[in-house]
Image (cartoon, rainbow, N blue to C red):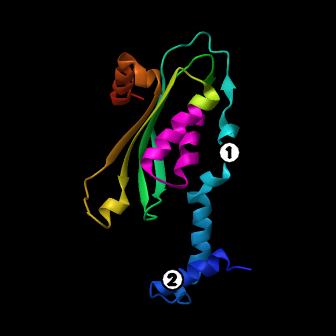
Amino acid sequence: MGLSKEELIRGILQELGEDPNREGLRGTPSRIVRSWNEIYAGYHQKVASIFTTFTETNGYSQLVVCKNIELYSTCEHHMLPFFGVAHVAYLPDEKVIGLSKLPRLVDIYARRLQIQERIGEQVTDALMQYLKPKGAACIIEAVHMCTRMRGVQKQNSSMITSSLKGCFLDDYAIRTELIQLINMQSNA
């Protein structure tokens, strides 16, 4: 039988040169395990389970955009955080999805060891698979601690990625409308 998660964390603390028995660190292994249950919760969630759709759209055929979805993830290369916002959109065909489902979809994929590019692709792939819209888009802007804390140590850098499917990839006018809606200032 292998070591428990807490014992593995104690070993890491020792490798760092710490004493896991000192007062400030005694509870750290169990705290880390509990925090990982939240941070990596995406591994235990099923994407299909969030796709409650509505077919009664009353003919709605315009863009649906949920912007500024807070995103927190962990870089799979260095296990350091990255965070920012995602803008998710789709052009309905026959179904729409409840608005809260779009941030949940982002969280399912973000709360795993990840790269930013993959999150966008996974979000748009899931929308295309389960919702079957005319198109799906996910644009993410995030700050990566692996480029701020180590390596190049560039404090003002951020990364923008996009994943465009269907009409967002093929139709310049729809893509332009999406960008305008994302850039629109909210009065809410």
Residue 182: give x, y in percent of width and height: 38, 29
Label 2 element class:
helix
Between 154 and 66, the one lying in front of the other is 154
Label at residue 179? none
Q: Viewed as shown, does residue 116 lie left or right of 125?
A: left
Is residue 111 magenta-colored? yes
Q: Which residue is mark 2?
A: 13
Of the numbered discs 1 and 2, the one sitting upstream in the chain is 2
Q: Which residue is mark 1?
A: 46
Residue located 56% across and 19% down the image: 92
Between 111 and 135, the one lying in front of the other is 135
Q: Is residue 166 above or below residue 31?
A: above
For the record, the magenta segment spans 100-127
Quadrant the N terminus occupies: bottom right
Q: Is residue 138 above or below residue 59?
A: below
> Which quadrant would residue 27 be assigned to in this image?
bottom right
